[in-house]
Amino acid sequence: MSEHPAAEGQTVHPDLVGELSGPVEALLLMADEPMSTLTLAQALQAPVEAVEQTCRELRDFYDRTGRGFELRHLAGGWRYWTREEHAEVISRAVLEGQQSRLSQAALETLAVVAYLQPISRARISAVRGVNVDGVVRTLLAREMIEEAGQDPVTGAVVFRTTDTFCERIGLESLDQLPDLAPHLPDASTLEAELGQLAAVPPAGTTTDADQLPDEPLADETLDDEMGAPRRGDPPAPAGGTEEGARP
């Protein structure tokens, strides 16, 4: 069975799609992360094409009927999200005091990793001009980035973004990242400049990043959007909130 979505023009017997609608909804409602078409098909013991068409028809039905939530395909799977236009109501009634967001420093660091990955901690520091140890720890704890091996030249640990990053930002894949602004250097040009301006010595020795000023403590943590930060609370995804209520 293939995990890739079935072609939009491919159809499956409507009776089978109707039978799968309820079970698909139930599985997606209990899931705490996006579920791929293949995973759904295996759980339902149904053809991948039928499950894919069921998910598409459910998505279109929710859009057509103006439900307060929507079904999105992102980060390689399907998941319910509340609609963006209801964010204020949800924040006030359900998520007050719990919805947290990344600090500006964390967002800037995350952007550097997203566009230049895989990238070492020292090179992130060189781009940002500050020591990013605290912010990197925060992003690792939030599972927005992960270790991706070592630099073949320096031996330094390098980092990349995770599926959680795509999910929270609202991207299906990194290919959907917006292009860098025309006045900014592309990744290869910036990498060459970093090689000249911020050469990294072998692992275990002092790096230029060690001499950079530390990121302010307030920027090493997650700022709470509504009040004091709460350890372990996930950030709200862009373009809507994860579905917490049942339709």
Image (spheres, grey):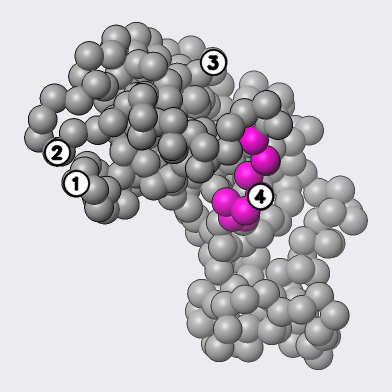
Picture quadrant of residue 193: top left
Picture quadrant of residue 78: bottom right
Residue under circle 4? 176
Question: Which three-letter amino acid code belongs to the residue tagged 4?
Answer: Gln
Image side of residue 143 versus residue 96, left or right: left
Picture quadrant of residue 137: top left
Q: Which mark is residue 203?
A: 2
Q: Which residues are magenta?
A: 172-180
Residue at screen point 43% across, 45% down: 117
Residue at screen point 44% across, 38% down: 191
Label 4 Cα crowd, 10 Å radius (few <14 / some 14-19 / many 20+): few
Label 3 Cα crowd, 10 Å radius (few <14 / some 14-19 / many 20+): some
Q: In the image, residue 121 lies at what x, y percent?
A: 30, 33
Q: In the image, residue 162 lies at what x, y percent?
A: 43, 49
C-alpha distance separating marks 2 and 1: 6 Å
Of circles 4 and 1, which is in front? 1
Residue under circle 1? 155
